[in-house]
């Protein structure tokens, strides 16, 4: 495992254990291995990721859709752990280099701006030498907790418990 300097003073987060997640739910080591970290002072979220053989796109390299899916969940996790329960409105991914399978890389995301119910984020995908493989920008929309409860009662209560543990209501009073 690589010791990324960005992960100093971070705490591990288990995003996806409170509810089913396409990326970080049931782990499949042959598809995507992932571990999230949160830097409480900066609000940044990081993910150590390795794409396995079942995430192949071009021969020997990660599929662009798999790379993008991790960006989407990473930026969503960044919203949630910063006390903004939100859903994706739009995001774009820009690819710079093909990413070899089985290479451990680091995703980094941070909130750029919060404007009413809109959250703008930026993210990047780098390796241990800071070589950048891809970047992403996202727009997420803050949701009322009742909306998640209406979507699925079981998941809604788990999501509410997750947000409550991150002081969502306390942090939102200033908005």
Image (cartoon, rainbow, N blue to C red):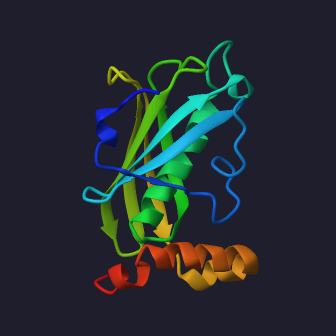
Q: Residue at x 49, y 57 (%)?
A: 77
Where residue 72 appears, x then y in whole percent?
54, 49
Residue at the top extreme, as displayed? 59
**Count of marks, rendered view:** 0
35 sits to left or right of 78: right
Q: Is residue 131 visible?
A: yes
97, 43: nearer the viewer:
43
142 sits to left or right of 4: right
Where residue 9 appears, x then y in whole percent?
29, 49
76, 48: nearer the viewer:
48
Q: Quadrant of residue 29?
A: top right
Q: Residue at x 56, y 57 (%)?
A: 15
27 sits to left or right of 64: right
Question: Up-down: is 165 above or below 140?
Answer: below
Where residue 47 appears, x then y in whole percent?
47, 42
Question: Up-down: is 122 above or below 158?
Answer: above
Where residue 31 appears, x then y in whole percent?
70, 32
Q: Is residue 135 visible?
A: no
71 sits to left or right of 27: left
Q: Quadrant of residue 128?
A: top left
Residue at the left extreme, as displayed? 41
């Amino acid at each position: 495992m690589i010791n990324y300097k960005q992960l100093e003073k971070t705490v591990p987060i288990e995003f996806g254990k409170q509810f089913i997640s396409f990326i970080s739910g049931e782990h499949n080591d042959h598809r995507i291995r992932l571990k999230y970290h949160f830097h409480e002072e900066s609000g940044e979220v990081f993910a150590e990721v390795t794409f396995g053989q079942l995430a192949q796109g071009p021969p020997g390299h990660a599929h662009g859709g798999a790379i993008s899916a991790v960006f989407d969940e990473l930026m969503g996790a960044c919203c949630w752990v910063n006390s903004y329960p939100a859903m994706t409105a739009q995001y774009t991914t820009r690819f710079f280099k093909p990413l070899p399978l089985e290479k451990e890389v680091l995703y980094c995301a941070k909130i750029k701006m919060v404007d009413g119910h809109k959250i703008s984020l930026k993210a990047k995908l780098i390796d241990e030498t800071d070589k950048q493989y891809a970047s992403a920008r996202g727009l997420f929309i803050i949701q009322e907790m009742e909306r998640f409860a209406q979507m699925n009662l079981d998941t809604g209560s788990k999501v509410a418990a997750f947000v409550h543990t991150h002081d969502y209501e306390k942090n939102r009073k200033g908005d």
